[in-house]
Image: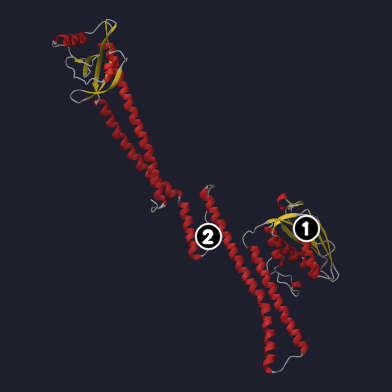
Amino acid sequence: MRRLALRSRLALLTAAAVAVAVAAAAFACWFITRDQLVAQLDSTLTTQLETQLTPRGGNVYIESILDQCQTNAPSNNNLPPGLTSVQIIDSHGQRCVGAGAVALKVQHTDVQVADGSRDSAKHNARTDGGQQVRAVTLPLIKNNARTNLAITVSRPLDEIDRTLDHLAWLLLAVAGVGVVGAATAGLWVARTGLRPVDRLTEAVEHVAATEDLNVRLPVEGEDEIARLGQSFNAMTAALASSRDRQQQLIADAGHELRTPLTSLRTNIELLERSEATGRPLPPEDRRELLASVKAQMTELAALIGDLQELNRADAAARSLTVVPLHEITETALRRARLRGPGLTIGAELAPWYVRGEAAALERAIVNLLDNAVKFSPPSGVIDVALHEGRLSVRDHGPGIPAEELPHVFERFWRSPTARSLPGSGLGLSIVARIVQQSGGTITLAPAEGGGTLATVQLPGAPTAPPETLPET
């Protein structure tokens, strides 16, 4: 069964279900019809007994049977029409068969009717010759008094059997047609219903063979198949976007790495040529060259660290916990004050707890503060505030031109006025990614009076949940 195609299995299951239902209905119909026919025959025999053979004043045919049983004299009376047998039974199980009738085998229920322990008996019986008949037995009433005798009448079951056989063949034919029709309909329904799945299969095979992530499935309706198509389209779109970002990151990283590597290579070649030719550089030039090499190595290390952090920010969902944003900001402020010893960094921090990763949030805040330190004038002021989840960092530097604001969170983007300053162009991209993963938003805008205002809004609460409070 499992080796068959899905549409074949659906067609077979549909046909099997219909076959079971039709068979159950056919059996029920056959048994109900049989019971109805038997009940109708019983009613006919009972009526015939009560109206023709056992009238209160006696009956000529019954009298002749009784005389025959007592005197062994032959009877010339004919059997009533429609009957196979008429026989009288005493309480000892002895029988006396009427003229022209077929003898039936006496059953225990017939004797019970004769001795008065039962009012009637209706059952299938057999003649002495083996023919199956339907028999009805009632007490024999003579002169309005019940005797110790019972009278049994019967009719053959052939007419019922013929009707039931005809009905059985008819039901079998109808069932066969129904099963074949159900199998055909099931195959058609399976093909129609699985057509979207076939399209999805072809699309997946195409993507696997060509790595073309621009494939999209047409989506119609709102059923499960439509949801599957929407999920596939969303998946391929996400994969295509991820691949594009990866390719762009590799291209941008290669571009950014090329400049310090080229400069580093040039400086090292100068040192090597000086040693090879035996003409050492002047001490001052040598010190400047070594300082340049050290600065380029530091820049490379910082760039590689930023790339690693950006890759970590792009990774799958992290294990987020409730952390105190005000304490993380205080730690970042201590680091920022060491990097800008001549600056004044003021802070007003209100308690605020957020769900995030403490190390990542600290890195994001440090990047914001480093950005403010970098663009602040000597002996400048940086204002930091945290109130109801709104963290603001305001510097008094030259600010960011309005036309450059839409690009500040792009990877490796650097303002033309800041390309001479140290940095990789990844700091704000890392900040934006970490804030988004914590469920927050970040904006940069010109500050009133000059400078730049960076605002981070993170959802949270002024108090920690009970499970995060330290034990006392």
Rendered position, 427 above or below 289? above
Q: Which mark is residue 215?
A: 2
x and y percentages locating residue 83 in the rendered image = 22, 18
x and y percentages locating residue 471 in the rendered image = 74, 52
Mark 2 surroundings: few (<14), some (14-19) or many (≥20) residues within 10 A: some
- Proximity of marks 1 and 2: CB atoms separated by less than 8 Å: no
Using residue 52 as the reference point, say whether residue 313 is left or right of it.
Answer: right
Using residue 292 as the reference point, say whether residue 148 is left or right of it.
Answer: left
Quarter location, residue 139: top left
- For image coordinates 25% across by 25% down, the residue present is 157
Q: What is the image's colouring?
A: secondary structure
Q: Residue furthest left?
A: 73
| Residue nearer the viewer, 459 or 323 | 323
- For image coordinates 77% across by 59% down, the residue present is 327
Q: Residue furthest right?
A: 379
Mark 1 surroundings: few (<14), some (14-19) or many (≥20) residues within 10 A: many
Tell me which amino acid carries mark 2: Val
Residue identifier under label 1: 326
Q: Earlier in the sequence, mark 1 or mark 2?
A: 2
Residue 92 visible within the image: yes
Distance, label 1 to label 2, CA atoms, is 47 Å
Tell me which amino acid carries mark 1: His
| Residue nearer the viewer, 212 or 239 | 239
Secondary element type, mark 2: loop
Secondary element type, mark 1: helix
- For image coordinates 79% across by 54% down, the residue present is 351
- For image coordinates 36% across by 31% down, the residue present is 28
Rendered position, 307 above or below 68? below
| Residue nearer the viewer, 452 or 168 | 168
Quarter location, residue 171: top left
Rendered position, 386 above or below 250? above
x and y percentages locating residue 15 in the rendered image = 38, 43
